[in-house]
Image: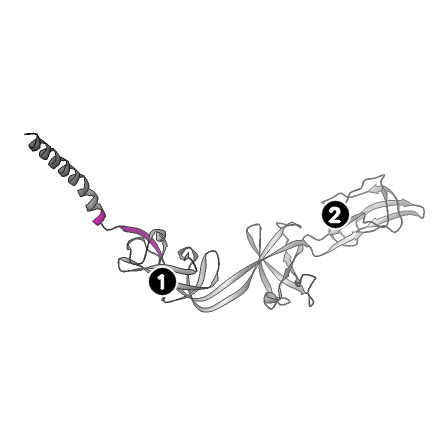
Amino acid sequence: MRKLLFSAFILLILLLFSACNEPEEENKNEEIITPVETAKVKTGDFIIEKVIYGQISPVKQTPIIVQQPGEITSLKVENGDEVKKENHLATIKSQMGSQTIYAPNDGEIAHLHVQEGSFQSNEEPLMMIVDLDTLKISFTVTPTVLDQFKKDDKIKVLIDDQHVEAIVLAIDTLPNDTGQFLIEAELDNEDRHIIPGMTGKIVATDKKVKDTIIVPTEAIMKESDESFVYIVNGDVAEKITIEIKETQSEETAIKADLKKGDQVIINGQFTLSDNSKVEVVKEGK
C-alpha cells in the first residue's frame, strides 16, 4: 500500500512539473519580432560644413583727440547721442587758451567717460564717434576654405537667430601667426538691430565627398573594429558592413553594398542580429 501511494505521489509531482514547464517551452519556441523605425538610404554629394565665428564692430569709428591737455569746461554731448558734422561737442581750457571741439563727421557718441571739470589729456581720446548704420564682421579662415571668399562677394551671416547679408570688403593676402587669413565683410544696419560686440556665424564648405552613399549617423553601429548598419529585407534585418568616409552629427558618407532607397534601421537596431525578425512601425520617406 505504501509503495502504491509513493508511486502515485511521484507521478503527481512529475505531472505538475511537466505542466509548469510547458508554457516555458512554448515561449522558447515563439519567434521574437522587433519593432523598428527606418530611414531611406540616399546618394549624392556629401558636404561637410564648417561654422566660422566673427566679431561685429563699426566700419567707421573716429577718435576725438584734443590738441592740448586741459580742463573740460563745457560738455555738450553724452554717450548714445546722435551728432552731425560740425556739431559742438566740448570746450577745453588749456595753457594755450580755449579749444572748441567739433564733430568731424556724423555718427553716435561712444566711449565718453569724463564730465565737466575733468582734466583731459591729449594722449587718450575724449570720446569716439561711431557710424552704427554700417557695421563689419571680422573673421579668420584656414587656407582650405579661403578660396570660397572673394572681394565684393555676398555672404550670409547668422546673428542672433537672424540671417543677414554681408559684402566682403577685404581679404588679407598673408596669414596671421596662427596660419589663418583675416576677412572683413560689411553689414547694413540702418534699422540698428545689430549691436557692435555681437558674434556672427558664417558657414563655409570644409570638405566634399562626391557621389557617395549617405545614411543617418544614428543608424551606424560599431563592434570591435567593424562598422555596420541593418537594413530591412522583407521581414528580417540584414547586417551590412560599411566603411565610413566622412561623418557629421546628422548624416554620414559611407562605402557599402547599399543602394538609394534601401530602408536602413535607425531605431530598434541595438537588440538585433543578422536575420532577426522585424516589424517596421515607422518607415522613412
User: Relative to residue 45, is residue 119 drawn left or right?
Assistant: right
Mark 2 or 1 closer to N-term? 2
Quarter-of-image position of residue 244:
bottom left
Q: Position of residue 163 (x, y in %)?
A: 55, 55
User: Relative to residue 126, is residue 265 drawn left or right?
Assistant: left
Which residues make up the magenta segment?
Answer: 28-39
74 vs 151, nearest the viewer? 151
170 vs 175, nearest the viewer? 175
Please state which amino acid type lies under the numbered disc 1: Ile
Using the rendered image of the protein, determine whether residue 12 is visible from the camera's viewpoint.
Answer: yes
Q: Which residue is mark 2?
A: 109
| Disc 2, SS | strand
| Disc 1, SS | strand
Quadrant where the N terminus is found in the figure: top left
Q: Position of residue 194 (x, y in %)?
A: 62, 50
Q: Which residue occupies 12% across, 35% down?
A: 12
User: Does residue 158 lie above or below 180 as drawn?
Assistant: above
Alpha-carbon span between mark 2 and mark 1 = 66 Å
Q: Which mark is residue 41?
A: none
